[in-house]
Image (cartoon, coloured by chain):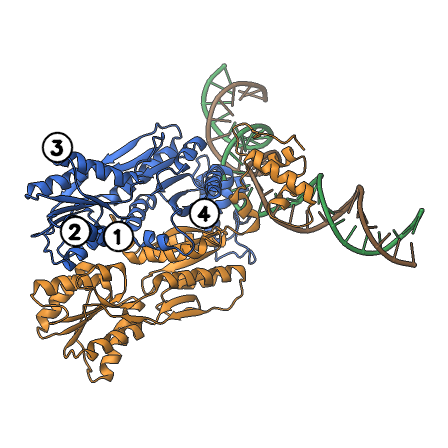
Chain colours: A blue, B orange, C brown, D green
Amino acid sequence: MTAAGGPVRVGDRVPTLEDVARVAGVSRATVSRVINGIRNVDPQLHEVVWHAVGQTGYVPNRLARSLVTRRSGTVALVVSDTESHDDDPFMGRFFADPYFGRVVGGLMSVLRTAGVQLALQMVGTDQQRARLVGDLRNGQADGVVVLSLPAHDPLPRMLTDAGVPAVMIGRPAEPVPINYVDLANDTGAGLAADHLLGRGCRLIGMISGPADVPASTDRISGFRRTMARHGHAWVPLVSGNFTQDSGEHAMRDLLAAHPGVDGVFVANDLMALGALTALRAAGRRVPDDVAVVGFDDSSAAVAASPALTTVRHPLEDMAAESARLLLGHVEDRNLRVSSVIYEPELVVRQSA
Amino acid sequence: MTAAGGPVRVGDRVPTLEDVARVAGVSRATVSRVINGIRNVDPQLHEVVWHAVGQTGYVPNRLARSLVTRRSGTVALVVSDTESHDDDPFMGRFFADPYFGRVVGGLMSVLRTAGVQLALQMVGTDQQRARLVGDLRNGQADGVVVLSLPAHDPLPRMLTDAGVPAVMIGRPAEPVPINYVDLANDTGAGLAADHLLGRGCRLIGMISGPADVPASTDRISGFRRTMARHGHAWVPLVSGNFTQDSGEHAMRDLLAAHPGVDGVFVANDLMALGALTALRAAGRRVPDDVAVVGFDDSSAAVAASPALTTVRHPLEDMAAESARLLLGHVEDRNLRVSSVIYEPELVVRQSA
DNA sequence: ACCGGCTTGGAGAGCGCTTTCCGAAGTGTC
DNA sequence: GACACTTCGGAAAGCGCTCTCCAAGCCGGT
């Protein structure tokens, strides 16, 4: 044991466990035990070791630790890269979309307290997918949260086959035994339909998202089902791609095809914003001439004028739940596959 | 060399370099050389090895590799966690703010092509800071991009002292020899002042951000300077905290104190949105009664109605440049410290 | 005194990889 | 045909850590 005192330098190297052991006058094993809080260490030695840690400024090397423990203390967030061609028409939009940030915020709220890091991964090609799964099997991350994948992406199946703890946000397009957290999109769309019908709209259209993502198809089918139940066997539908521009275009098209439309359900708030712009340009007042209901209750909904009546999508909560679910499966590898479905609710503001 | 053929299983283990070597009938060293594209390997062996890689489904273990190469192929994105108390009043907002997403998008556009991963880190306490620097020194990440730090955060200095490659987005509040990429915030604010003055506004106010972040103070000083140069030695100023709500409040206050205000420069688009709401509530028409200029040119600017005249903040480009700068410094440790300043430009829309 | 059972700390193997060092071939020159 | 010189592949030493052994010490019971 060295005299209590100032910092101990070990050259310009980063101090290692070995250095701490030398300073404390014990073996590496003992230092390791102390650091990891394993019992069976004499309280006095315990103190000596911690003191040496302080003196040397030792920080455990996570890489080395992970190599042997097979635990990295990291989870990966995987986002799809398929739609991003060359210089990023899609990607820029995807990250800037509040969707991404809300998910990250929700995940971090849980991971942070668990001392787990988040690593961002973009996956597009088969090679990248194989690489990702390989990295995961190698223990680079303890688990993975999968976000926003195109419909027939083989990744979910690959992950389950590899036995990697995984959770999807939004259900997989094809039935795969994978954990997921989702919103009852169909119910939410039904809420919108009910509200529009309830306020007396006669000709109600819908602006949907792309046809190949489950969240989008569920909103379509839920909307249609409820409309049909109220005698509207058919509803005018135009599809966009969840961007503001596409919403504006879609609304213009809808207006052109059905000038008498007096209510519209738009499958997300961003497109609803675009729809609002198109309606204003066409001289229609909202909600007097045309009532508009959005989806997501994102920050855009309150920013809009008139403020959007919309379906609340508790994305942060869902992301947080995904993180918890994932952490559970990391802890206990043979927990059974489960899914959590959130119920949406209608937030009535001014647009409908 | 085994016969050409199907996959080779190695039990339920993940295949290692050793397995590949055995299958290929060579030594680990040779496989390593082939994988890493080091010359001096007989082309024929080369082929045999790659074939074995394919058969075994081998994916190099990055952890093990990093441990010896001292290169992780990862950069960390550090965001401040100081303002987040318990259950996240701040954090949720921060991540949902387009600012965060735009930065991530910009970073990824560069990192992705370089095959570098991004790991998210939140830092609030001294302990977390020390841990982060330690992890970095241990080679957990090759470098770090620092985002949105409170004014007197010691992190920048700690990073330079530790000799860790680092780039800040937004200049440090105190002079620290650290790389950074920033926007000429003062010039941008001057642009806004010029525009407002140019369209004939007589009583021009400003809604600023918090007083302790450089981006905010620079906008204030730039605005004041230009106003003073045109004979307005003093301008009414109310501060917010960059959120939509705070902008609404600030605008109300400004209106109450100076009912005759006919122009206002708001230090970011989100607050400008709030200001628009307050103005509408007060019965003022924009831009006829009050002209509004925002800052950022975020998606909120086009979403607003009337669409915001604003100062373009090329955040994606800046983030991409940060990534490039960082990668350069990772490559060559003794590149000299440098900074890149982007020039903003005014985007004229309807609000002014 | 002796022995079984307990606690405690050290020695050392090994996680999967890179890389230095060397010896064994292959190539050219006089 | 002997020599230096080059090219190539293998053996083995680590990178920093954890964790399984195992030995040493200590207790009370006989």
- Determine which residue is flagged by label 2: A255
| Figure quadrant of the C terminus of chain B | bottom left
Tell me the residue at 7%/65% (across/down): B282
| Distance from Cα at disc 4 to Cα at disc 2 | 72 Å
Q: Quadrant of the N terminus of chain B?
A: top right
Q: Which residue is labeled 1 in the image?
A: A246
Nearer to us of marks 3 and 4 is: 3
Q: Are marks 3 and 4 in contact (CB under 8 Å)?
A: no
Q: Which circle's residue, 1 or 4, is located before the other in the chain?
A: 4
* Mark 2 to mark 1 CA distance (whole Å): 14 Å
- Give the answer, above or below, for where B188 lies relative to C3: below
The residue singled out by tag 3 in the image is A229
Q: Is residue B206 above or below residue A22?
A: below
Q: Earlier in the sequence, mark 3 or mark 4?
A: 4
Q: Residue at x 69, y 41 (%)?
A: B44
Residue B14, image x, y percentages: 52, 34
Which of the two labelled residues, at mark 2 and mark 1, occupies the earlier sequence position?
Answer: 1
Residue B248 lies in quadrant: bottom left
Type of the residue with mark 1: Ser
**Residue position for label 4:** A50
Tell me the chain of label 2. Answer: A
Q: Are marks 3 and 2 on the same chain?
A: yes
Image: A95 above or below B262 = above
Q: Amino acid at mark 4?
A: Trp
Q: Looking at numbered disc 2 in the image, what kind of residue is underneath it?
A: Leu
Q: Which tag, 4 or 2, sits closer to the chain's start? A: 4
Front residue of B308/A34: it is: B308
Along the line of sight, the residue nearer the viewer: A1 or B258: B258
